[in-house]
Amino acid sequence: MDKLGLLIDALGWTLAITVVGVGGWLLQTWLRIKHGYPLDGAWGQAIYPSSDRLENIQRIVADRPSRLANEINALGIDKGGNA
């Protein structure tokens, strides 16, 4: 076989191994979320996915902008970031 043929074969195997590895990682992450196990953070800490994040986003988007602005102003934070 020539060098180009060997290179194409090596790239094919590398691609196949990469696809299997990423697919396995995605399956493991999905199963952990589905069954309530924590995910691993960047420094190895346990991260529990929040189930109400989507509800909060839907509430913010669906509410009137003036109501959201009033809630933010009610927090009493000035422009300098002080409460």
Image (spheres, helix red, strand yellow):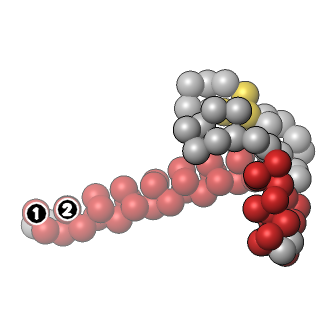
Q: Quarter of the image holding residue 57?
A: bottom right
Q: Distance between the residues labelled 1 and 2?
A: 5 Å
Q: Mark 1 points at which residue?
A: 3
SS for dot 2: helix
In the image, is 22 to the left or to the right of 32? left
Q: Position of residue 8 (x, y in %)?
A: 24, 67
Question: Residue at the location (56% across, 25% down)?
Answer: 43
Is 71 above or below relative to 43? below
The reply to whether discs 1 and 2 touch (Cβ–Cβ < 8 Å) is: yes
Badge 2 crowding class, 10 Å Cα cut-off, few under 14, some 14 to 19, many 20 or more, is few
Q: Nearer the viewer, residue 72 or 27?
A: 72
The quarter of the image holding the N terminus is bottom left
Question: Residue at the location (29% across, 62% down)?
Answer: 11
In the image, is 30 to the left or to the right of 1? right
The reply to whether residue 71 is visible in this rendering is: yes
SS for dot 1: helix
In the image, is 26 to the left or to the right of 68? left
Is 35 above or below relative to 20? above
Looking at the rendered structure, the kind of residue marked 1 is Lys
Looking at the rendered structure, the kind of residue marked 2 is Leu
Which disc, if any, is residue 6? 2
Is 28 above or below relative to 70? above
In the image, is 64 to the left or to the right of 2? right
Q: Quarter of the image holding residue 54?
A: bottom right
Q: Residue furthest left?
A: 2
Q: Which of 32 and 9 is in front in this view?
A: 32
